[in-house]
Every structure is written in structure tokens, then in C-alpha cells.
Amino acid sequence: MKELWLKGKRLIPETEWMEEITSLKSKEQIKGKGELRKKLISAIEDRIPHKKFGIFFSGGVDSSLIAAVCKKAEADFVCYTVGFQDDVTKEPEDIIEAKKVASELGLNLKYKIFDLKEAEKIIKKTITTLKPVNKTDVVNIGVGAVVLAAISLGKEDNIDYFLGGLGSEEIFAGYERHNGVKDVNQECWTGLKAMWGRDLVRDFNLSKELKVTVRTPFLDSELIKCAMKLSGEEKINDKGNKVILREIAEEFLGSFAWRKKKAAQYGSCFDKAIEKLAKKDGFKFKKEWLNKIESE
């Protein structure tokens, strides 16, 4: 099983990523869930290791489906969920939803809610890790802090292998920018190519720093080829977004398949932690505070 974005233990160059994505394009069209269901399950099962592992778990359709397939395969895994909360911040939505799904499906869930001091330590470590690759903008640090926090939680259990849902939003049209475009799949192809600079550099460097392996079933080449042969209408319609994925996931998750999830930095409230740290140090904007920490 080849991980599309890796060459051995290295992140492939951006030009090769572009070539890999372009090579998956096909003029063939398919309709319906049959073939897609098989490719989805296969992409997940092929990445189940012969040891205990972790799943980055938010209670959204992507991570919940991965967990449900792994449970059905009788794999040995723990779901890891993280969030930030203080006296005035409500409980993170991802924590709330993760507990609901884990209870319903009988999953082994470990979660941690970080206070501001703990979150600051995680965020600063994320900045230090991503500074050499120039990924210290608000979004990359917000998302990266969630990834780093989850990995750190797993490492307490000696977990060094994780599955994550990265890629699902692109191949199944889950972002806001997919709504209302003339050609949904063309927007998906554009987004897939942009993932190298937007997501893969960040996640690769975080996993490298913490010496763990991260695998991404939704970036399986056969799954991408299959998903991108579907029409845009099967992905976005009057039911919402990622529709065909949610319809398949409903078999495993019931109504949880239709949860409208926030981006990781918002569902976990780590973006709120960055905002609070910026204000605490007298900065109006989060980016100003991040720049200050980066320069220290």
C-alpha cells in the first residue's frame, strides 16, 4: 500500500504531488455507492497496522467512519480527541460529539481538555516545529496545534501510528468554496493539488518532529480515482455536502453521519486559545501574537 504523499519516509516534492494527482484523472463516470463503498472500506482496512494505533477523532463523519470500519475489523485502537476550555469558554464541540459517537459505537475514547497554560505550551511547540517550513499562519498553527495535541496524548499510551481523515473534504466537496461553483469536481481537483502546501507540509513536519506515522485513507489513490468519477451532484445537493459519503457512512453511524462539523481549530476551540493568548499579551490580532512568538 503506497501512501500517495510520501516517498519512503520523506514528503514528496510539490511538483511530484501535482503529477500524482494529475495522473489520477479519468474521463470515466460512475454513479451510485457500490464501488465507492468498497474502495472506502479497503482504503481504511489496508492501513490498519498489526499493532495498537490511534485515530484522530472529532466525532465528524470522516473520523467516525474510520473508527467504525476499524472496529468492525476488530482492530486494536484508541480514538483521541482534544480541545481547549477555560472558565468562560464552553466545552469544545468536538469533545461533546466525540463522546456521543464513542458511546453509541462502543469505541475506546481518550480525550483531554487543555487549559490556557497547557494550550499555550502546545501552540508554542507547534510554532517552533512549523517555523522552518514557513507554516506559522493562524490557520496552520490552529490546525497544527490540534494535531500535535492529539499525537502527544497518544504518545502517553506509547502510540506511534495514527489514522486521520485528511483529504475527505477535497474528494467529497466538503468545503464552503465547493458550494455554488460551476464544476464541483474541477474545484475538488484544484483543492487536491493545493493540499501539498496547505496541509501536507504541516502534518508531515509535525509527525516527523514527534516521530510518529500518520496514514490518510481518504488520500488513497484508488479511492480518489473512484470518488472523482462521481458527479458533483452526488457530492453536493439539497441534502448538504459530502452527501454520498454520508449516505455510505449512515450504514455504520446512523444519524451521526450527518453531523455538520466545524474545522478542527474551531471545533476544538484551539483557535479561541490563540485569540485569548494574543489578548493576554496585549495584541489585537492573533497573527501579531504568533509573529511575536515566532521571533523569540
Image (cartoon, rainbow, N blue to C red):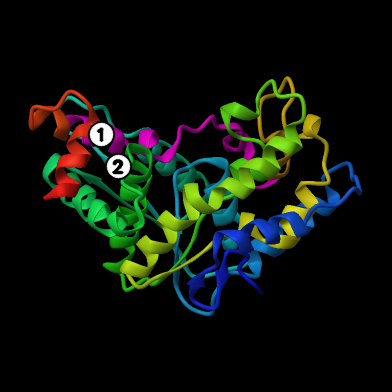
Q: Which residues are magenta?
A: 251-276
**Quadrant of the rendering where the N terminus is positioned:** bottom right
x and y percentages locating residue 249 in the rendered image: 67, 44
Label for residue 86?
none
> Residue, x 8% and y 32% (percent of image)?
281
Disc 1 marks which residue?
Answer: 287
Magenta-drawn stretch, dominant element (helix, strand or loop): helix
Label 1 or label 2, whichever comes before in sequence order = 2
146 or 277: nearer the eye? 277
> Residue, x 17% and y 23% (percent of image)?
284
Instruction: Answer yes or no: is residue 106 visible.
Output: no
**Relative horizontal placement of residue 122, taking residue 175 as reference (left or right):** left
**Relative horizontal placement of residue 187, taking residue 232 as reference (left or right):** left
x and y percentages locating residue 41 in the rendered image: 70, 59
Disc 2 marks which residue?
Answer: 83
Q: Secondary structure at mark 2?
A: strand
> Residue, x 84% and y 53% (percent of image)?
35
Instruction: Answer yes or no: is residue 157 visible.
Output: yes
Q: Quadrant of residue 202?
A: bottom left
